[in-house]
Image (cartoon, rainbow, N blue to C red):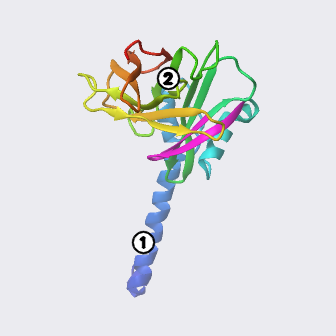
């Protein structure tokens, strides 16, 4: 056998070694990313699950979300916005049926070596009048872990704008925030104004969420005190 290896052309030997390395690398990655694999075990443990959840591994982000959530999303919610972010996609949706309140749901898919997997999701629903320019509510918000990075990951802060005079939303720095974060604002085809921002894992509560007009007039302010929080912010009395 040793003599046979010695007689093999150098390129054939190198090619064979590369094939073996690639097979071993793929096997290791698959063991981590397969449904119910090491990555799923870590995420399940981090979220307090007693058993390992199985997150489908799919070719697209939308299919990964659909396979994990099942028909629940398609039957009860309409996708209004999909946003690419670093190593992932945010998928925003609203309830299909008429609603006398404000609601917004987000699903997060992350890109892995072998495809896409569901990473996180959540949403809120408030009763009362719909949020619009004439409402006392300026915007809604929710903060939640995004889990695109390991071991802890980042946070997603998002919501819907009810006061159309609001043009920019920021997280103001205090001792808990080293710098100012500015939200992205997107208007959907249906006319909804959705805002969102990614906060790094180093950010700690409490911090201030503030919304301004294009004239830099403060329209809404809220102090966020927990890493899992949602609510509706009224218009500021400051003019």
Label 1 to label 2: alpha-carbon separation? 54 Å
Residue 119 belongs to magenta span = no
Which residue is under mark 2? 141
Q: Is residue 209 left or right of residue 41?
A: left
Which residue is under mark 1? 17
SS under mark 2: strand
Residue 156 seen by the camera: no
Q: Is residue 129 left or right of residue 11?
A: right
Residues at circles 1 and 2 in contact by the CB criterion of under 8 Å? no
SS under mark 1: helix
Q: Residue at x 52, y 21 (%)?
A: 140
Q: Quadrant of the N terminus?
A: bottom left
Residue 143 lies, in percent from the top left, at 46, 24
Q: Nearer the viewer, mark 1 or mark 2?
A: 2
- Identify whether 71 is placed above or below 26: above
Q: Residue at x 49, y 25 (%)?
A: 47
First in residue order: circle 1 vs circle 2: 1
- Identify whether 31 is placed above or below 172: below
Residue 45 lies, in percent from the top left, at 48, 28
Q: Quadrant of residue 108?
A: top right
Disc number placed over residue 100 in the picture, else none: none
Q: Residue at x 43, y 71 (%)?
A: 18
Which span of residues is magenta-colored? 77-92
């Amino acid at each position: 056998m040793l003599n046979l290896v010695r007689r093999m052309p150098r390129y054939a030997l190198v090619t064979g070694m590369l094939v073996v390395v690639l097979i071993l690398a793929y096997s290791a990655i698959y063991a981590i990313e397969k449904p119910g694999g090491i990555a799923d075990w870590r995420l399940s443990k981090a979220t307090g699950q007693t058993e390992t959840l199985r997150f489908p591994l799919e070719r697209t982000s939308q299919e990964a979300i659909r396979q994990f959530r099942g028909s629940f999303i398609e039957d009860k919610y309409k996708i209004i916005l999909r946003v690419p972010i670093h190593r992932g996609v945010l998928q925003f949706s609203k309830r299909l049926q008429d609603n006398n309140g404000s609601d917004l749901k987000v699903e997060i898919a992350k890109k892995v070596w072998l495809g896409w997997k569901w990473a996180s999701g959540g949403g809120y629903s408030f009763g009362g009048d719909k949020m619009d320019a004439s409402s006392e509510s300026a915007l809604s918000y929710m903060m939640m872990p995004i889990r695109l990075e390991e071991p802890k990951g980042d946070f997603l802060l998002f919501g819907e704008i009810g006061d159309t005079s609001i043009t920019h939303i920021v997280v103001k720095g205090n001792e808990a925030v080293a710098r100012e974060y500015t939200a992205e604002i997107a208007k959907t085809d249906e006319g909804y104004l959705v805002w969102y921002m990614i906060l790094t894992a180093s950010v700690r509560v409490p911090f201030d969420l503030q919304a301004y007009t294009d004239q830099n007039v403060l329209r809404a302010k809220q102090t966020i005190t927990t890493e899992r929080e949602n609510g509706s912010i009224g218009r500021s009395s400051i003019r």
